[in-house]
Amino acid sequence: MHKWAWTSLCVLCLVAILFITLTRVKVKNQPPVENSLTVAEALGSSEATGYARATEIREFVFPLDHGPHHEFKTEWWYYTGNLFDENGRHFGYQLTFFRTALTPHPTPRPSNWATHQAYMAHFALTDTKTGKFYYFERFSRSALGLAGASAVPFRVWLEDWGAEGDQLRTFPMRLSAQEGEVAIDFNLESTKPMVLQGQKGLSQKSSQPGNASYYYSITRMPTFGKVKISNQTFTVRGTSWLDREWSTSALGEDQVGWDWFSLQFNDGRELMYYQLRRQDGTADPFSSGLLVEKNGSIRQLTASDVEIQVLDFWRSPESGATYPSKWAILIANEDMKIEITPRLAHQELNTSIRYWEGAVSARGSFSDRTLLGNGYVELTGY
Amino acid sequence: MILWQAGFRYLWRHPLQVLFAVIGVSVGVAVVVAIDMANSSAERAFRISADALSGRATHMIVNSSGDLSEEIYPQLRMGGGWRDSAPVVEGYAAIPEQPGLLLNIVGIDPFTERPFRSYSPSIGSQFDLSRLLTEEGAGLMTERTASRLGLTIGDSLQLSAGEERHHFILVGFVETREQISIQALDNILLMDISSAQEILNKHGKLSRIDLIIPDTTSGQRRMRQLQHFLPSYAEILPANARVQTMAQMTKAFQINLRALSLLALVVGMFLIYNTMTFSILQRRTLLGTLRTLGVTRGQIFAMVLIEAILIGTIGTAIGLLIGFFLANGLLSIVTRTINDLYFVLNVDSLFITPLALTKSMLLGVGASAVAAFIPALEAGRTSPRAVLMRSNVESRHRRLLPWAVTIGLFFMSASLLGLNVPSKNIIASFLLMFTLIIGYALVTPGAFVWLLKTLQPVSQYTFGILGKIAVRNLMGGLSRTGVATSALVIAVAASVGVGLMINSFRATVDQWLRSYLQADIYVTTASTGFEPGRIPLEDELVNALAKVEGVKFITKARHIRLESQAGPSELFIAEINRQGFDGYWFDSGDKDEIYKAFSESDSVIVSEPYAYHRNLKRGDSITLRTDRGQRRFQIAGIFTDYGSDRGRITMSRQLYTTYWNDKKTDALGIYVKDGYDVDQTVNDLVQTAGERQQLIVYSNSGLREASLATFDRTFAVTSVLRMLAVLVAFVGILNALMAMQIERARELAILRAGGLTPQQLWHLVIGETSLVGLIAGLLALPLGIVQALVLILVINQRSFGWSMQISIDPVILLQALGLSVFAALLAGIYPAWLMSRTSPALAMRYE
């Protein structure tokens, strides 16, 4: 009897120990690929009701529309560019300002810190020669002059990163940002008119009304200035591109992200095309683009006009996400065939919104002529 | 083995003695443990909370005299490019429905929080920030705090900070991902900086800016650049400055508590000593027999020591248990005192570490072993033959008496000499005080004999032959009575000493308040606590109050806290007229001259504790960070002040406005015209203030009462400790005297057989114990008074820099004497009852 009692006690203890051990051991998985956030989510606000929506074509008024549209939830000023120093050394840059409204119904409050607008900014620099990619992220509330945007005089800034227009006219524009060992200070000129994307600036992203943005671009801005890395300063020249978009809700339920291409060719033309991707990996019919002629005239491109082939992939060692990394774009109507290669494979921004945004070079043909170009590609939702 | 059995059998057969010894040790240990736990819990609660609030910040920018202007922050980030910086607005708010509970409001900027505090809401934390940022009064707390307040997400709560009431809405829970214990965030209310400014009425202000500056050469260079970048009033302090300041502020307070708790243990040690000495006396025949049987001295020594350690261990174990419960009670008293005197602190649970328990365990057992060392040595040393003779023991004690007195006197003089050496070492001062006590204890048996001799004729004359027998008995049994008396003397003296000290202190503070508080009415804003940084009075209101009928004139005052590398200083700015200046007590110097310097030159007066802690004399100067940069001020005089144990600087308002841009007032002294009723004027003032600003209005006597109430609360802990020491002493007397009488059973039986009636026996026993009580009480008085003097003139002076007047209250002395006699009387009842019932024949057959 005693023996049995002891034995069962021992067995019970063992079971208990085993149970405790098992519950405490966590199965170690492959780090999961985190889902991307939207700009609004990254800035901590996901509710979309109560804001204005892009439902119909509107009249764009400049310079007013360079400034913020607070009644919409999300807005961005997206500067990218490819620059070369006198020895032909290539640099790519991205300086982006995101705005998010925190509430559609702001109430006046006594504190100077009270705000209903939050800003996020990304600054990235690609140094192709050394293979280095620098990127930084900032946040701030729009209060006490820490961050904000205005149309006249044009200015969008987050602390000491900013884009600032001339007192009365928008151009020339001065872009400056610095963080860590990297700094840029550029002057941007305007040589081509603004182009309205989509239907006269209304860029429909899905079939649902209101899932759209107002969208315009300045596709070619001659740029000169300085790039500073550590204690080296480079005098650079090249071209920049500005994308301006504001919306409350853009993507449809089935859409997971987009691949955005902006290319500036040596024949004076530019191409913008974004492909919206659906959950199953196919291209959404609402994908759309624009071909800008040297004289500024535009031709709309739809999903049926453009074929994109992915030629290579790259897996990020940091996030584990796999991105397409080389493309062939075929536009049969225009007799265009372009191959796009990233300047560096690693141009992923592992920020609160994780995405790949990088400088690319393009080589292809238009009719019989060889086409060379530079540009930027953005890949989200991977 | 048989040896141990013999030992334990003895203890087993004398349960009462063992019980008393165990009680003595356990109460002693309990007091030490409880104070230790309460102290360390309070300290730890503050430390972890401060650490959690600093997060990974290494430094902070503060304004040496209050809050920072919020404009500094954008300049820092935009112009200076100081990225690792985070603004904080901090303060306290009360819950009107739950008086006594203060919530610590911490306003942060979620956009810059990420590098600093892992638990606070920040970008990317998947928390919906929009409510927190855009709703007035929205905030977060831990789930624990919320459930204690009975709140769930979406609930709101009324908060009052200063004059206004605000709504707080709970929009989420604070979750910690790191190792900071959730407890650290108890009663903390995290908010967006905008809501915090609104609730705390700190518009345009920041409490501090947290920084992360790496401890590298480049970090140091950055710091120097930052120092240049900042305006002159802003200062960079290490992030842990708060914790250090706290530790410094409460150090003296905690050492004092600890020392007083040790006093209880010392009394407990006397109990062990007494029990063991006594048990050896009783067992002398057994021990002698054992020795003749071949048991070595070492074995007997070990036996006695182990017995004591056993008693000590049981006592300590019980003491730890009692201590735990006691600590729960003491914790709230200690916390309240800290809240009254130093800073807001919420502690609701005890903190116990294995180390602290082990420490207390060793202390208890070790003290028992030390106490038993001499008895054990004695037991081992006696020769087998000699030990059989009782008279031998007594004569040996007699012989030792002069030695004990000599050594005791030596200890006492050494201690008194030592106490006269100027020093700031509090621990050393306490050690010297303990030496004094031990010295006195050694002298006590000698003094006891001398007193008995003196009393013998009196006793004989009054009580006849019984009186004579009683005195001779006590003298004959010196080995027993001597130790008992010493224990009693020490315990009673401790109670006298502490009692006199508190009384003198209270009397001094009362007198000081009567002199210092010159105005008829005092008005201040309803801020949380009396600490500096109060909400200012509105200027218009001040003017309105001055015009109230019956008001003769008003004087304006302001309290601010100056932060500096050397810790915070309180600056009190006041308009003091010549008449009001008479209320100040100065240690030296001519009052007219001091007043002239104070009101006409760049001079200040500082309080005694301030001068003491910083080694300042009259005529020295101090450097303060003003709004015009660093400025030197001469010390015109050092005044008595019990308002702050860290000390304060008092400056004339005129001088203050010359060097600071602040023209605000947060307190008023109001003088009432002759013939007007003060209470009526108080009512009128409250009426005038009305809804404009919530004020606290005290009449002169009301403020004095409130101040004394705070004083009493402060000394509540000390009083509790004093009571506990008395309790141990009481047990000690019971133990010693009862044992003595029981041991004399045979002797008394002979007296009974010789014709002593039971009633006479009662008289004899009670008479003897009362005599011991009386003599011990008398002997305790000088020691008590000396102890009080040491506490007042040395300990308090060295701990806090306070000097006070000595007042010896005869009531306390009589109480002590009464206590001593009463306990002794009580100790005689049981043996007397026992012996009067036992037939003499039975008692004599014992041997």
Image (cartoon, rainbow, N blue to C red):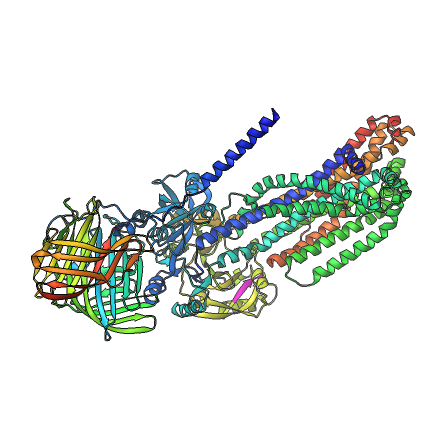
Q: Which residues are magenta?
A: B604-608
Between residues B518 and A335, which one lies in front from this camera angle? Answer: A335
Residue B536: percent from left, percent from top: 41, 56
Q: Image height check: is B374 above or below B543?
A: above
- Front residue of A86/B833: it is A86
Please give left or right for residue B35 compared with residue A317 in the image.
Answer: right
**Which quadrant of the structure image shows residue B78?**
bottom left
Which residue appears at 17% of the width and 67% of the height?
A: A221
Residue A29 image position (x, y, % from top left): 38, 46
Q: Which SS type dominates the magenta stretch?
A: strand
B351 or B773, which is in the foreground?
B351
What's the residue at 69%, 63% (across, down)?
A: B421
Q: Is residue B708 visible?
A: no
Q: In the rendered view, does A92 fall on the left or right side of B510?
A: left
Quarter occupied by the N terminus of chain A: top right
- The number of discs equals 0
Residue A216 in sight from this viewpoint: yes
Percent position (x, y) of residue B550? 44, 52
Query: Can residue B359 be found in the magenta stretch?
Result: no
Question: Residue B30 or B515: which is nearer the viewer?
Answer: B30
Residue B378 point in image, percent of width and height: 83, 46
Residue extending furthest toward the bottom: A86
Q: Is residue B614 left or right of residue A315?
A: right
Q: Quadrant of residue A243?
A: bottom left
Q: Residue furthest top?
A: A1
As drawn, A232 above or below B93: below
